[in-house]
């Protein structure tokens, strides 16, 4: 942050020195035309010999040009560096914020949109700095400097040079409004394209399995074409705007030449002075039109900038209360107290959920897909807060704990294990990054994974594609062993595994369950049979509870679910 500030300040000073050098450029010309070539007396500091004087002034002009160019180049590098560092800083901030934002935020957005905001929209801060602030200062100071010099010269001509300013301002305002509107549209469309790419590449297996590649290509094609269309319209407005601005400034120069020429003819202005004036007028319109283009640049950078700010201003829904304490020495007593929750207000997914689980117990959640099993587990992890009732761990409301410390006490073995593109060892240690190699190997052994791991440092392909389903499952179990937390969430794999792999996984899972509070989303009859308590969900409520045998004897909901889900009669 400090280096950006220093760079920005140094860059602006260098730029201003360059502007000052630029202001001097027309003067040697006047001396050449009026004094050396013309009839005006030579200034005392020049050599009396006209040829030597000409060479000296030319050399001086060259030196001024060099100085101006060098200062401009140097300041550009320093200022661009400052702008890029600002972008870097902003990217870090947005990414950090995205990592912290609650699932409620991420659920409601396409991943590609967030990717686009972090990757591309963050560059707007550089545009705002380099194309905005720096330009305002540079062009503003240049304009002011020129005005001072020109006014000293000839007030009427200066005012004439400025007569185009209102026309410039009006045309610029007109075009900016139009450009800003299509710019917003363009950015939204680009972001949508990014979301489409992200979505279909992430799900490429599914896309190919359903042979829907052509439809995906078409969907991308349509989105991308809409973006091109918006971009073309935006460019057309920008080009039209430059054309009109160019026309107005050209008209201004021509008027100057006409009036100035008359003055020279009348002997009220020397030829050299007219040249200086015309040189200034040429230089005057440069900063003027760059100031005018500025509003456009700022407008089009403000849209992506707002999209970044929108993320930064979103507060995580799940936050630690000021008095939240870390959860340490957790026993693993879990209690749901009359919990009601829905993703949308007024549409509860779970209603009046009430139970208590002790360490050593295994609770199986039973019910058809979409009944709210995962939602219950998300509440335990405090991904969401219930709308009514409480979730308690060790007798305390989970909201009393720092949520990250709560999550550290819970291990999850999901149905579809997620592996990161890192080594096998790093993947096993995801829940405890500082674990030793011995601990990692011990966990892999307990998870029946050591047998297939040849090299712990071997990288896992992105999303774990180089490993079979059963192997990924065992890595996830090893991860849970290493984390060694008192509460365990298991989502049994539904995919058919070969008998040997299945036996290994079941053995590892049995071992993992010992002495923990276990919640399992069961897809196997053997698992529900061994559960200490079944919670049968229907329509967002627990409709039956008890052991497998008790519930089968009851011949109610559960008996029907068993027939449906496990395809056997209990
Ligand atoms: P299960 O795990 O039993 O299959 P879930 O807990 O995943 O069921 O889902 C319960 C209900 O909540 C479903 O109707 C599902 O559509 C809805 N749901 C799940 N996740 C979300 C979410 N992030 N946003 C909105 N609705 C959701």
Image (spheres, rainbow, N blue to C red):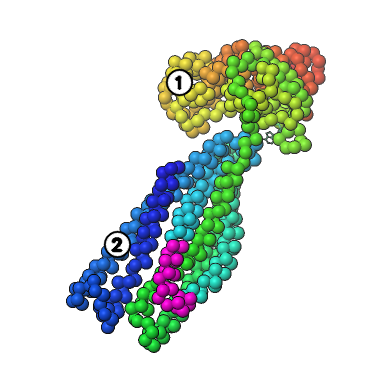
Locate residue 319 relative to residue 22 in the image: left or right. Answer: right
**Residue nearer the viewer, 137 or 302:** 137
Q: Residue at x 46, y 79 (%)?
A: 156
In this orientation, does residue 436 appear?
yes
The quarter of the displayed image where residue 147 is located: bottom left
For the residues labelled 2 and 1, the Cα–Cα distance comes to 65 Å
Q: Nearer the viewer, mark 2 or mark 1?
A: 2
**Which corner quadrant of the figure contains ligand 1?**
top right
Locate residue 328 relative to residue 245 in the image: left or right. Answer: right
Q: Mark 1 sits on what residue?
A: 453
The quarter of the displayed image where residue 523 is located: top right
Per the image, label 1 sits on a secondary structure element best described as: loop
Tell me the magenta residue range: 140-160
Q: Residue at x 54, y 68 (%)?
A: 169
Q: Is residue 17 rendered magenta in the image?
A: no
Split into 4 quadrants, where in the image is the N terminus?
top left
Q: Which mark is residue 66?
A: 2
**Residue nearer the viewer, 265 or 86:** 265
Image location (x, y in percent) of residue 441: 46, 17
Image location (x, y in percent) of residue 328: 59, 18
**Which SS type dominates the magenta stretch?**
helix
């Amino acid at each position: 942050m400090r280096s950006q500030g220093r760079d920005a300040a140094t860059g602006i000073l260098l730029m201003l020195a360059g502007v000052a050098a630029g202001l001097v450029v027309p003067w040697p010309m006047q001396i050449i035309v009026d004094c050396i070539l013309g009839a005006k007396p030579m200034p005392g500091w020049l050599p009396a010999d006209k040829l030597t004087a000409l060479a000296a002034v030319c050399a001086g002009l060259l030196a001024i040009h060099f100085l101006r160019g060098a200062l401009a180049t140097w300041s550009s590098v320093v200022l661009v560096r400052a702008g890029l560092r600002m972008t870097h800083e902003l990217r870090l901030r947005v990414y950090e914020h995205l990592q912290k934002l609650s699932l409620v935020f991420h659920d409601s957005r396409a991943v590609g949109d967030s990717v686009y905001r972090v990757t591309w929209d963050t560059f707007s801060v550089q545009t705002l700095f380099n194309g905005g602030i720096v330009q305002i200062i540079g062009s503003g100071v240049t304009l002011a400097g020129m005005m001072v010099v020109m006014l000293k010269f000839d007030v009427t001509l200066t005012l004439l040079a400025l007569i185009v300013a209102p026309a410039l301002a009006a045309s610029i305002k007109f075009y900016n409004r139009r450009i800003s509107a299509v710019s917003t549209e363009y950015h939204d469309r680009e972001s949508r394209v990014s979301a489409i790419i992200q979505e279909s590449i992430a799900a490429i297996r599914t896309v190919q399995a359903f042979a829907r590649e052509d439809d995906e290509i078409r969907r991308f094609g349509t989105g991308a074409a809409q973006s091109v269309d918006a971009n073309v319209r935006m460019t057309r407005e920008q080009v039209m705007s430059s054309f009109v601005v160019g026309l107005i400034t050209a008209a201004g120069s021509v008027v100057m030449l006409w009036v100035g020429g008359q003055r020279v003819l009348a002997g009220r202005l020397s030829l050299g002075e007219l040249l200086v004036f015309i040189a200034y007028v040429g230089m005057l319109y440069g900063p003027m039109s760059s100031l005018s283009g500025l509003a456009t640049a700022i407008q089009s950078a403000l849209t992506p900038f707002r999209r970044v700010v929108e993320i930064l201003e979103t507060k995580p829904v799940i936050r630690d209360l000021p008095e939240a304490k870390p959860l340490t020495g957790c026993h693993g007593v879990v209690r749901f107290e009359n919990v009601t929750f829905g993703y949308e207000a007024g549409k509860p997914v779970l209603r009046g959920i009430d139970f208590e689980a002790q360490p050593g117990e295994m609770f199986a959640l039973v019910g058809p897909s979409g009944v709210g099993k995962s939602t219950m587990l998300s509440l335990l992890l405090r991904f969401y807060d219930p709308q009514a009732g409480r979730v308690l761990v060790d007798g305390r409301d989970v909201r009393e704990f720092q949520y990250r410390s709560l999550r550290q006490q819970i291990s999850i073995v999901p149905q579809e294990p997620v592996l990161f593109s890192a080594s096998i060892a790093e993947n096993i240690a995801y829940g405890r990054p500082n674990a030793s190699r011995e601990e990692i190997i011990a966990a892999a052994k307990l998870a029946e994974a050591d047998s297939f791991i040849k090299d712990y440092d071997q990288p896992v392909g992105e999303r774990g594609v180089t490993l079979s389903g059963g192997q990924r499952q065992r890595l996830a179990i090893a991860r849970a062993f290493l984390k060694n937390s008192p509460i365990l969430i298991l989502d049994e794999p539904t995919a058919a595994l070969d008998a040997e792999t299945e036996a290994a996984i079941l053995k590892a899972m049995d071992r993992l369950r010992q002495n923990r509070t276990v919640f399992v989303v069961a897809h196997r009859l053997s698992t529900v049979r061994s559960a200490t308590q079944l919670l049968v969900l229907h329509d967002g409520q627990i409709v039956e509870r008890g052991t497998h045998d008790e519930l089968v004897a009851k011949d109610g909901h559960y008996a029907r679910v068993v027939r449906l889900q496990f395809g056997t009669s209990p």
